[in-house]
């Protein structure tokens, strides 16, 4: 059954309500769904299933440490929900997740960050992840922030993929205003391991976006894709650095950044870094920074849409 | 009727369209034929009203209404549309999203249009209109989109480009379907198999109408004269 910390039952219920309101999903109350629910600097709800072990503690400096261990050969058919929220107006939320995922595991994580009704907050989450041999892991991270822009999110992930492991990440912050965000994903891949990283962020007003995605293709035949899409409006500043290092023989990497701007005060940049150490490695990159393409606008307007309607359709595609 | 009256258009000081007058009849298929680079696609963009293709001189009338200064959106809303030679890619948009134009068009008619262009709706509605869709598939999706608009006039700029040879009959069927359903089709083409189904043809050279008439006469002339001509864009004959 769902383990709700009695003293924090109100916070649990408020977070669940906010989550359901933003997503129309009632998984957090479902006993068949593994979940970890964090409010502020404490775990307020926990539901584990066979094969998953979760331990948490709050350090003296306020950092919440959460250890997630998944045993070898565990297959979890329904996504594991990680819900972090903050119910005060101001403050700091510091989290450290340590994932130890065994061999031959199949698991999907669905993470949501509910940071609405907040004036000023620093939310920092460091994740250290080990993914065992032949395991298949996906991680979807979706953010819901307050529209006043007073939130600073840092999400830093270090992951080590063992032989033939697969990891897919989808980081989406497109539905509400982002504020300031710093995303770092640093992945180390062993032989035949595969990583597929995708980030989509919609910047508004004076939002500031920093993304750094790093693929260290150390193993032979390892491969990875790191793709970032930014839609920057108003006075948004966005800096994206995608890096790939071809260290293993026959490793393959592709990095891609697409930044679409709308507004005269937008400031965006993209920096690709490709470094081949092993002559048998192959790395590619693709980047674009600019307005919405005129040919796309013309095509949609030739179907009777005005420019604003055409832009909305194109942007909805970019950030979907 | 859609009427071009003495249209002239220059770009970078170069005269590309040099006084074209054409009447496009309602519910007819009119073909525009000519070698590469003679101004056929430019004419299409001028009719559609693209911002970089405003004529320097001349008038465009739709049913006697002067639409020369109308925007691309205004013209589309009056019933003029364009099947683009090179359909664009739209990252993140599914075929369903794209064809519904933001929810304006219902799913059942979208499915019908996909069937007409021989794309299985069960397979294609959820596909993305991006680089994973081949050029030919994107072209078919674009044709389906034009069918859904039910335009009064549809300019089809090389509708066969990107489409395999075996599917040329599908293009012809679509042209006939559009005509039967009240659309005047303006087809720009190099292909005799397509042009031969038009009611009337215009041969363009050097930004002017070189000849006009029933399609078989124009094709005969093109084959006997233009195919052998070394003076593309410098015809020796008097232009009409």
Image (cartoon, coloured by chain):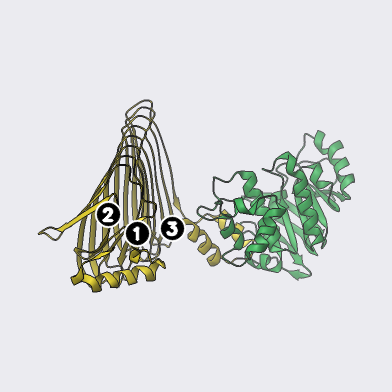
Tag 2 residue: A155
> Which circle, 2 or 1, is nearer the viewer?
1
Specify whether residue A290 is in view: yes
SS at circle 2 = strand
Q: Cα distance, mark 2 to mark 1? A: 24 Å
Residue A33 disc label = 1
Quick one: label 2 or label 1, which is nearer the N terminus? 1
| Nearer-the-camera pick, B178 or A36 | A36
Instruction: Name the colour assigned to chain A in the rendering.
Output: yellow
Quick one: label 3 or label 1, which is nearer the N terminus? 1
- Dot 2: chain letter: A
- How many residues crowd mark 3 within 10 Å: few (<14), some (14–19), many (20+)? many
Q: Position of residue A131 (x, y in %)?
A: 29, 42
Quarter occupied by residue B108: bottom right
| Nearer-the-camera pick, A292 or B109 | B109
Instruction: Name the colour assigned to chain B in the rendering.
Output: green
Horizontal side of A22 relative to A156 (left or right) equals right
Residue A145 disc label = none
SS at circle 3 = strand
Q: Position of residue B22 (x, y in %)?
A: 80, 57
Tag 3 residue: A261
């Amino acid at each position: 059954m769902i383990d709700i910390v009695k003293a924090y039952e109100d916070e649990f219920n408020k977070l669940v309500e906010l989550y359901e309101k933003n997503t129309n999903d009632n998984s957090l109350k479902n006993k068949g769904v593994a979940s970890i629910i964090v409010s502020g600097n404490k775990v307020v709800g926990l539901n584990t299933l066979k094969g998953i072990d979760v331990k948490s503690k709050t350090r003296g400096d306020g950092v919440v440490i959460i250890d997630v261990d998944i045993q070898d050969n565990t297959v979890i058919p329904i996504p594991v929900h990680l819900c972090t929220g903050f119910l005060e107006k101001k403050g700091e939320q510091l989290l450290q997740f340590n994932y130890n995922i065994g061999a031959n595991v199949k698991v999907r994580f669905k993470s949501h960050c509910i940071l609405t009704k907040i004036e000023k907050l620093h939310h920092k989450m460091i994740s250290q992840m080990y993914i065992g041999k032949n395991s298949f892991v996906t991680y979807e991270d979706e953010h819901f922030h307050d529209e006043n822009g007073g939130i600073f999110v840092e999400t830093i992930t270090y992951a080590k993929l063992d032989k033939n492991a697969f990891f897919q990440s989808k980081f989406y912050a497109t539905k509400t205003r982002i504020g300031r965000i710093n995303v770092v994903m640093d992945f180390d891949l062993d032989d035949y391991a595969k990583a597929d990283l995708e980030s989509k962020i919609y910047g508004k007003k004076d939002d500031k976006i920093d993304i750094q995605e790093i693929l260290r293709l150390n193993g032979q035949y390892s491969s990875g894709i790191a793709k970032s899409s930014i839609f920057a409006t108003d006075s948004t500043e966005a800096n994206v650095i995608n890096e790939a290092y071809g260290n293993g023989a026959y490793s393959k990497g592709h990095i891609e950044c697409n930044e679409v701007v709308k507004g005269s005060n937008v400031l965006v940049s993209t920096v690709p870094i490709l470094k081949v150490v092993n002559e048998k490695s192959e790395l590619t990159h693709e980047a674009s920074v600019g307005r919405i393409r005129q040919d796309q606008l013309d095509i949609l307007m030739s179907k009777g849409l005005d420019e604003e309607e055409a832009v909305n359709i194109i942007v909805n595609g970019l950030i979907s | 009727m859609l009427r071009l009256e003495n249209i002239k258009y220059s770009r970078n000081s170069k005269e590309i369209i040099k006084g074209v007058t054409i009447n496009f009849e309602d519910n007819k298929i009119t073909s525009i034929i000519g070698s590469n680079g003679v101004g056929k696609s430019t004419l299409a963009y001028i009719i559609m009203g693209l911002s970089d293709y405003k004529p320097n001189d001349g008038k465009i009338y739709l049913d006697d209404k002067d639409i020369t200064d109308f925007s691309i959106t205004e013209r589309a809303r009056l019933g003029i549309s364009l099947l683009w030679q090179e359909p664009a890619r739209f990252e993140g948009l599914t075929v369903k999203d794209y064809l519904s134009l933001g929810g304006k068009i219902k799913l059942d008619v979208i499915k019908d249009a996909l069937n007409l262009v021989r794309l299985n709706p069960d397979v294609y509605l959820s596909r993305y209109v991006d680089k994973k869709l081949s050029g030919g598939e994107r072209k078919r999706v674009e044709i389906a989109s034009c069918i859904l608009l039910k335009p009064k006039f549809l300019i089809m700029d090389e509708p066969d480009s990107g489409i395999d040879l075996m599917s040329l009959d599908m293009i012809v069927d679509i042209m006939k379907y559009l005509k039967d359903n009240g659309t005047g089709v303006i087809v720009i083409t190099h292909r005799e198999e397509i042009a031969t189904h038009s009611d009337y043809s215009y041969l363009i050279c050097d930004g002017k109408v070189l000849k006009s008439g029933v399609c078989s006469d124009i094709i005969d002339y093109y084959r006997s004269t233009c195919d052998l001509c070394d003076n593309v864009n410098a015809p020796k004959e008097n232009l009409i």
